[in-house]
Amino acid sequence: MTVQQGGVGGAPPAAPVVRAGAEAATKVRSIDTRSTTGPIRRIVFLIGLAIATLIFTFPLVWLIGASLKTQQGVFNNELFTFPLQFQNYTTVFQIAPIANWFFNSVVVGLLAAGTVTISSAIVAFGFAYFRFPLRNALFGLVLASMMLPGAVTMIPNFLIWNALGQVNSPIFAPLWAGNLFASAFYIFLLRQFFMGLPREVFEAARVDGASYPRMFWSIAVPLTRAALIVVFIFELKASWTDLMKPLIFMKDIALFTLPRGLQDLVVRFHPQAGGEGQFHLIMAASVIVTLPMVIIFFLAQRHFIEGIATTGSKG
């Protein structure tokens, strides 16, 4: 019988067996640790999520509660005061042309969102697909236009639309027609999506004889539908809540949008302007302005999240 290194008579070494057993014990302990910490982390995450949800939804809940109170109790410490005053909403429709303002906002919002989505997508596709001299420099100039504050272009825009006779126009041209020339932010957003598309797909379409417009409408647009929906929702929300443009260009009460009409109600009912402090009616009008956007974001959340999550991804 011979003595070999690490064992006797060909027996397996003891050290590897001990090391393997120690590694197995370590793995078991790590698995046990993960099994105990996993549910705890999940519970902590859910609690934090619930707290954040309450914080962000509380203003909306308070607004709805205030819209269902009496004039005297609108600012009390109770979230809801019974009986609920649902007649506040019917009163708002009686004292102001809310339905007309709502229709104006829908028309302006759809026109603004649709035009800026199409125009920005066309420009973004050009920057993403075509190779031409000074392309990056030109794209940089487009992005640089985002640095201009709105106050800089406010007076020139008014002078242009006034010269065209579109101030207080029944077709609301100053509120949406500027979107025909695209938006720098949306161009940047959509360009990231178009650059993530495989170029080979477009080259194959060119070999098959597809024109550039056909490539855009039949290939690029369907593949970036989530991004286009995000742009549409962004601009619809921006147009729906915009007060500055209607305040500048719309003078006839019949042409007001909802934010402009809400501002008119605030001025009319505020005690400093001779009103009676009917803030419960202002709250009811605010709910009417807010709820459509809440519903739209809820219905389109799948496309919205998909579009945001894949921004700038490479395919």
Image (cartoon, grey):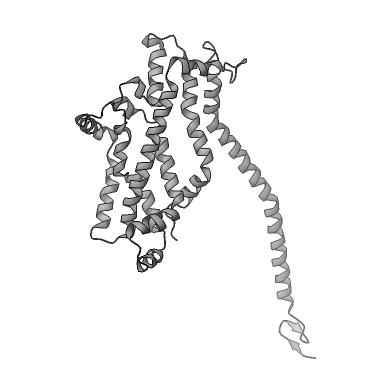
**Residue, far front:** 209
Image quadrant in which you'd find residue 125: bottom left
**Is 160 situated left or right of 231 in this image?**
left
Q: Residue at x 41, y 17 (%)?
A: 265
In the displayed structure, 95 sits above or below 145; it is above
**Is 69 situated left or right of 117 in this image?**
right
Q: Which residue is drawn at 30% across and 60% down?
A: 130
**Residue, far left:** 163
Considering depth in this image, is 145 or 250 the residue closer to the camera?
Answer: 250
Whole-percent x and y of residue 12? 75, 81
Image quadrant in which you'd find residue 107: top left
Image quadrant in which you'd find residue 101: top left
Screen quadrant of the C terminus: bottom left
Whole-percent x and y of residue 51? 59, 35
Considering depth in this image, is 228 or 173 the residue closer to the camera?
Answer: 173
Q: Which residue is drawn at 30% across and 37% down?
A: 177
**Residue, far right:** 1
**Is 280 situated left or right of 104 in this image?**
right
In the displayed structure, 197 sits above or below 262; it is below
Considering depth in this image, is 5 or 31 the residue closer to the camera?
Answer: 31
Whole-percent x and y of residue 48? 59, 39
